[in-house]
Each structure stands twice: as C-alpha cells, then as structure tokens.
Image: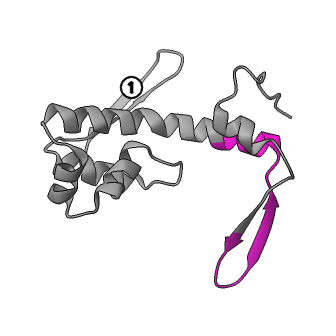
Amino acid sequence: MSKLPSQEKMSPSLRKALTGKPRMVQVDSSTAKILIELTPEKLEDFERSLNRAEPVGTLLAQARKAKGFNQRQAAQVLNRNHSRIAALEHPKPETAFSSLVQYAEALGYKVSVKLEDQKGGQTFEVKL
C-alpha cells in the first residue's frame, strides 16, 4: 500500500478529495455497472497520471502562443469550441492521445514520440 504525501505536499485537489465522506465512482457500460470506492491510494494514482498529462498540455499551450493564437483562434483552426482547447491544454488522464496529436497538427506542428530507457540505455523515437 502506498503512503500518501504530507498535507503540505498534496495538491489542493487531492486534499479536497480526501476530506469528507468516501466517494464512489460509477462506471457504466451496456452490460454492467461497477461501483469502485475511491481510496486514498486510487486518488494518488489518479493524481499521478494527471500530473503526467499536464506537461503535454503545457507544451501545447506554448506551441499555440508561439503561433500567435489565443484559445479562441486555435479553436477556429480545429473547428471546435474554445472550451475544448482549454481542456486539451489542461488534460485529464482520460484525454485521448489522438486529440492531443490532432491539436498539435492543427497548429502546424509534427508530433514525435520518444521512449528512453530509464537506466540510460536504448532510445526509440517515431515521428507521427
């Protein structure tokens, strides 16, 4: 079982989620409904995955600004509502990678994915 960080190191969203009654998440599908209790460990995993998505959104916001677009102008390029641009620039863990790639390409950028061995070994890269 993982140990939660101290209150000072927790993000405001994690602190808020851990207060009050336990929360439940309902997952619907055509065949079943599953209720899962949100434990502190699951919330920490969620936040960790969110934190991995945030740098991609930050990179997209920087790319947009480098092109001289505000969010509304970028939304026009993508033929979407500006709230969608805000969502891509502040992605949730479930944000589709293809949506992030589509946004980058609409701004005129090519996307590449690079895998680096954590121990400094092999590196793989592909341009999409």
As drawn, 1 above or below 120: below
Image point 65% across, 33% down: which residue?
A: 12
At label 1, which amino acid type do we have? Thr
As drawn, 67 above or below 20: above
Give how far across and how far down residue 120 sits, in percent: 47, 15
Mark 1 neighbour class, 10 Å CA radius: few under 14, some 14 to 19, many 20 or more: few
The image quadrant that residue 31 belongs to is bottom right
Instruction: Give the side of residue 47 with respect to residue 34, left or right.
Output: left
Instruction: Give the side of residue 111 with respect to residue 99, left or right.
Output: left
Task: Specify the segment rendered in magenta.
Answer: 27-46
In the image as oriented, which residue stretches furthest toward the bottom? 30
Q: Is residue 43 magenta?
A: yes
As drawn, 94 above or below 46: below
Instruction: Give the side of residue 13 with respect to residue 21, left or right.
Output: left
Image point 73% across, 35% down: which residue?
A: 15
Give how far across and how far down residue 112 sits, in percent: 28, 38
Question: Residue tagged by mark 1?
Answer: 123
In the image as oriented, which residue stretches furthest toward the top? 120
Residue 20 or 128: which is nearer the viewer? 20
Give how far across and how far down residue 79 sits, in percent: 20, 64
Give how far across and how far down residue 32 sits, in percent: 73, 80
The image quadrant that residue 14 belongs to is top right
Residue 2 or 86: which is nearer the viewer? 86
